[in-house]
Image (cartoon, grey):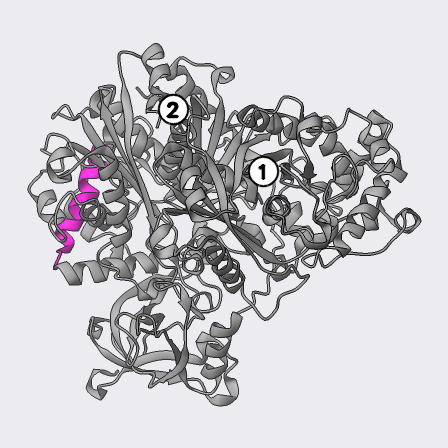
């Protein structure tokens, strides 16, 4: 069975606004760095390119048109995945597994600062007949789910606030994270309720940036670089789009993880995974996702967090990058943001937040409100 | 590499202003495809969605919205998106879902509901142009086809009369397609040449109009296919796709080089050395009549400029040596962008499986090719299928 | 085998009677033009057409871009062009952007700029010419808006007209 590895990473800085550059130049910068890192020429060596984008974020019908040039993909095999970066990664993984291709590139980006009506556009993702006409700010839905999650699991508002504190502190050690802050739990708890029980400091602010990953078949990867990181498994799943039919248990994350664990041969995730990056666009989602992924028992993630289990020196460090709360919500690039941190850690390039000797890391993404779709990727350091 | 077969297909009526929602259209097509495959949704491992601009419905992340109609709930669900090229790209994604060894059965559902857009589906296409260089000129999508057609006719000296023959052939072929909205058994070349001018040289009957509709395919690994439908083993033997530069005003508008590359990739994978001889049936993308000719040339089924001659000689008729668009194509059946999968991949499958009924071609084809085209005239996806 | 499909096409009147929800998406954007297109627009305001040269393939590129899609390397220098060009293709359009019919056709096409590499050009309108006089290969020149009305947009050029006076209307 062919193996798949990450042989190159490239990224821009992450910034709340980037008025001087178009999305094309952001992508070009990330791509150039990724190809240099992998030591490849995109015009000769890459057999397939994948970008991850949604039309309404970008403001184009058929954004696919505008993607090839800045990645070196003109007159090459390239296509768009309307979804998160980890879904793009899944397609690249499968393409290499078929044996048809040896090197595939995945790109995801956010130029969300170009969008002047974020809330209105997010509302367009709600059901046009049953949900959207009710109006309001779309984040209310996260407030509803958070209340339901707290009631179901006994998790407290303090525990959710502690997620924001941890991740914003972690971000201070990540030069890529613009939203780091040395804050205390009281600061979060006393920040205004926007969608009670959800508070202002528990919501990830938006950010611009681009990430490019170069994937290669395992044997080739070892010849290309001594920094290859194995992509051992990847899974994804979607729940019903009807909000009312979903439980607050992030079942999509559980199903995605089951698929990824099966490929990676992971039977006891708590024991076998050394660090995790999970979607935390709303602070409570980190706890909910950890439980769905089997990295904490239902209702126990909050308590483990307070005990320090998910800190840099804890038994399972979570979102050392700062997560979305620290790095910013990069819309469809969120999944690759999470994957990037895992790869940096496994390569020993995570600077001030480097773990001593991590071997296996998990990255998880969620497609955001109002949907129940997510993906999970398992990475392993080469021996 | 696991081998992959098509084991079922389904499609709805292609018509403008249908009462059903996008989800309902998806469900109808998916159910038919599952029924033909003899599988239940529970036996499907993963679902793939194809649908073109979200702006038709004004629904952001449209793939998520459609997922329950497509049978994607609580399954791995993926939306692959290459504009009009989606029609053949989602089955290609289905191919790699299975060929990679990750899944055994995949349901591919493509949907389009164009009639929701106001004032016209064309208004949505205004947003496919570059916002700084093109959109201030207030373009209509038809312009770009008109300009391409003009350049194609100029470079290869192709006559409008021969191009009109494509509309006549496809709209007549469509008479035998139960899902067709534009079939016309009596249409003549003169009707096409004298139809209402849109953006000259393009006239009304040169174009396939917007439609609503959905189509679906069930794909399975060859092992599974041999169990569930040993009577009709139709495999996907070659896949290819390619995108050209975004800078459309810098491209050669007469010959689709990106398509030739995609076709070459698919033929090499399928072990086809001489497509002119080894391809027995073709469903090239025909949203405009000249596109069928240009795409036959891009698919390397003839030399540049030769497709019009083959058409004039009747080679591309259902009883010809190389039947082209025996379904009736987009010109005859309708053009619900991504959902045209049903008359491209679906038609080749039904033809190779000898299940095309009144549309069945005469030359009993073994190997067929289908193709879709999209984005801003720069992308093509190509699929080669064989009966075993 | 395709089973007989259900449903049917509704007439326009029927479609209006079907229960439906009307919504107007509020989606507004401010796209960064980026350094290449941004400077191109600034120069249009001054009545000049600007290109960008790639020393990798030697092409002179319009629209200008900061990277070359063929070589995948940054482009190297700015090049001013005379603004004249040749028609590559054209259309005579009797429909507007929303597919409404119009009586006086819009003349539109792609031109390649003189001084740029083969095929490098833009889409624009043609004017001061009878529709039947247009042909591929016609040499054209820009007709600019008065300086005071220019705003740094592609429409700072009103249209392109034939260079030969006898072709003009």
In the rendered view, tell whether residue A157 sits above or below residue B380.
above
Instruction: Give percent across and percent down for residue C129.
Output: 27, 78
Q: Looking at the picture, tell me which residue is in the foreground, A32 or B85.
A: A32
Report the residue marked by disc 1.
C20
- What residue sits 34% from the left and 71% below the top? C56
- Determine the main secondary structure of the stretch shown in magenta: helix
Q: Report x, y in % for residue C126.
A: 32, 75
| Apparent side of residue B279 relative to residue A1 in the rendered image (left or right) | left
Question: For the point 65% across and 26% down, which residue is it?
Answer: A254
Name the disc covering residue B219, or none: 2
Nearer to us: label 2 or label 1: 2
Q: Relative to the observer, which residue lies in front, C66 or B19?
A: C66
In which quarter of the view is residue B159 placed? Answer: bottom left
Which residues are drawn in magenta? B157-173
Numbered-mark total: 2
Q: Residue B168 lies in magenta, yes or no?
A: yes
Q: Chain of mark 1?
A: C
Identify the secondary structure beneath mark 2.
strand
- Placement of the N terminus of chain B among the 4 image quadrants: top left
- Relative to residue A197, is residue B327 drawn left or right? left
Q: Is residue B358 left or right of residue A362?
A: left
Q: Residues within 10 Å of mark 1 (few under 14, many from 20)?
A: few
- Alpha carbon distance from label 2 to label 1: 35 Å
Outermost residue toward the left in this view: B313
């Amino acid at each position: 069975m062919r193996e798949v590895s990450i042989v190159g990473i490239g990224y821009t800085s992450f910034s709340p606004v980037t008025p001087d550059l178009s999305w094309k130049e952001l992508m070009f910068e990330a791509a150039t760095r990724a190809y240099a890192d992998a030591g490849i020429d995109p015009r000769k060596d890459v057999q397939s390119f994948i970008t991850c984008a949604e039309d309404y974020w970008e403001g184009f019908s058929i954004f696919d048109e505008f993607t090839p040039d800045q990645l070196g993909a003109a007159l090459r095999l390239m296509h768009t995945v309307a979804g998160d970066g980890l879904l793009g990664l899944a397609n690249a993984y499968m393409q290499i597994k078929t044996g048809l291709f040896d090197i595939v590139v995945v790109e995801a980006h956010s130029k969300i600062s170009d969008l002047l009506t974020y809330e209105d556009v997010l509302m367009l993702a709600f059901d046009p007949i049953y949900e959207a006409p009710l109006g309001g700010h779309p984040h209310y839905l996260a407030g509803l789910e958070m209340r339901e999650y707290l009631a179901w699991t006994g998790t407290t508002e303090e525990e959710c606030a502690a997620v924001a504190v941890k991740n914003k502190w972690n971000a201070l050690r990540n030069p890529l994270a613009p939203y780091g802050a040395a804050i205390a739990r009281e600061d979060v708890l006393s920040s205004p309720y926007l969608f009670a029980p959800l508070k202002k400091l528990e919501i990830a602010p938006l950010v611009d940036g681009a990430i490019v990953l170069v994937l290669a078949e395992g044997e080739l990867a070892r010849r290309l670089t001594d920094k290859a990181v194995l992509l051992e498994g990847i899974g994804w799943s979607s729940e019903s789009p009807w909000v009312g039919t979903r439980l607050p248990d992030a079942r999509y994350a559980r199903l995605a993880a089951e698929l990824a664990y099966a490929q990676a041969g992971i039977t006891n995730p708590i024991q076998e995974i050394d660090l995790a990056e999970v979607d935390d666009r709303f602070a409570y989602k980190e706890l909910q996702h950890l439980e769905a992924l089997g990295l904490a028992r239902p209702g126990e993630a909050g308590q483990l967090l307070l005990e320090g289990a998910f800190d840099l020196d804890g038994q399972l460090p979570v979102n050392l990058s700062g997560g979305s709360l620290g790095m910013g919500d990069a819309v469809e690039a969120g999944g690759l943001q999470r994957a990037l941190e895992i790869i940096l850690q496994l390569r020993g390039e995570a600077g001030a937040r480097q773990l001593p000797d991590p071997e296996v890391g998990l990255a998880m993404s969620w497609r955001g409100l109002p949907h129940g779709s997510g993906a999970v990727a398992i990475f392993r350091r080469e021996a | 590499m696991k081998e992959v077969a098509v084991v079922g297909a389904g499609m709805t009526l292609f018509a403008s202003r249908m009462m059903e929602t996008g989800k309902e259209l998806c469900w109808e097509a998916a159910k038919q495809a599952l029924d033909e495959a003899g599988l239940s949704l529970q036996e499907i491992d993963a679902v793939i969605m194809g649908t073109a601009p979200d702006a038709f419905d004004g629904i952001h992340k449209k793939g998520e919205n459609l997922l329950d109609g497509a049978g994607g709930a609580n399954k791995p669900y993926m939306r692959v998106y290459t504009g009009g090229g989606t029609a053949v790209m989602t089955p290609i994604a289905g191919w790699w879902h299975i060929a990679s060894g990750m899944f055994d059965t995949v349901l591919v559902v493509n949907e389009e509901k164009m009639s929701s857009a106001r004032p016209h589906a064309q208004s949505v296409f205004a947003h496919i142009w570059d916002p700084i260089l093109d959109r201030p000129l207030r373009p209509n999508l038809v312009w770009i086809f008109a300009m391409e057609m003009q350049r194609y006719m100029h470079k290869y000296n192709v006559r409008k009369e021969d191009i009109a023959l494509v509309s006549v052939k496809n709209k007549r072929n469509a008479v035998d397609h139960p899902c067709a909205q534009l079939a016309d058994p009596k249409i003549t070349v003169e009707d096409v040449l004298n139809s209402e001018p849109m953006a000259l040289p393009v006239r009304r009957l040169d174009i396939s109009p917007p439609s609503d509709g959905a189509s679906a395919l069930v794909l399975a690994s060859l092992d599974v296919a041999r169990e569930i439908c040993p009577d009709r083993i139709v495999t996907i033997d070659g896949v290819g796709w390619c995108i050209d530069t975004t800078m459309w005003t810098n491209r050669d508008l007469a010959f689709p080089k990106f398509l030739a590359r995609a076709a070459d990739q698919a033929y090499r994978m399928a072990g086809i050395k001489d497509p002119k001889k080894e391809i027995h049936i073709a469903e090239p993308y025909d949203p405009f009549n000249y596109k069928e000719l240009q795409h036959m040339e891009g698919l390397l089924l003839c030399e540049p400029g030769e497709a019009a001659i083959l058409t004039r000689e009747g080679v591309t008729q259902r009883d010809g040596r190389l039947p082209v668009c025996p379904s009736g194509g987009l010109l005859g059946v309708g053009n619900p962008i991504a959902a045209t999968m049903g008359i491209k991949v679906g038609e080749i499958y039904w033809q190779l499986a000898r299940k095309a009924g009144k549309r069945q071609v005469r030359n009993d084809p073994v190997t067929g090719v289908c193709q879709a085209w999209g984005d801003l005239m720069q992308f093509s996806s190509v699929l080669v299928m064989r009966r075993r | 085998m395709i089973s007989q499909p259900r449903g049917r096409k509704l007439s326009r009147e029927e479609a209006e009677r079907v229960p439906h929800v009307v919504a107007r998406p509020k989606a507004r954007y401010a796209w960064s033009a980026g350094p290449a297109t941004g400077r191109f627009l600034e120069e249009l305001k001054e009545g000049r057409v600007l290109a960008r040269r790639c020393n990798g393939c030697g092409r002179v590129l319009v629209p200008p871009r900061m990277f070359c899609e063929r070589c995948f390397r940054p482009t190297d220098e700015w090049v001013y062009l005379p603004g004249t060009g040749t028609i590559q293709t054209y259309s005579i359009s009797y429909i507007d952007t929303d597919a409404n019919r119009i009586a006086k056709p819009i003349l539109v096409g792609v031109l390649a700029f003189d001084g740029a590499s083969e095929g490098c050009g833009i889409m624009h309108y043609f004017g001061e010419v009878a529709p039947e006089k247009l042909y591929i290969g016609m040499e054209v020149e820009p007709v600019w808006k008065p300086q005071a009305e220019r705003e740094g947009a592609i429409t700072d050029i009103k249209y392109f007209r034939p260079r030969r006076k006898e072709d003009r209307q």
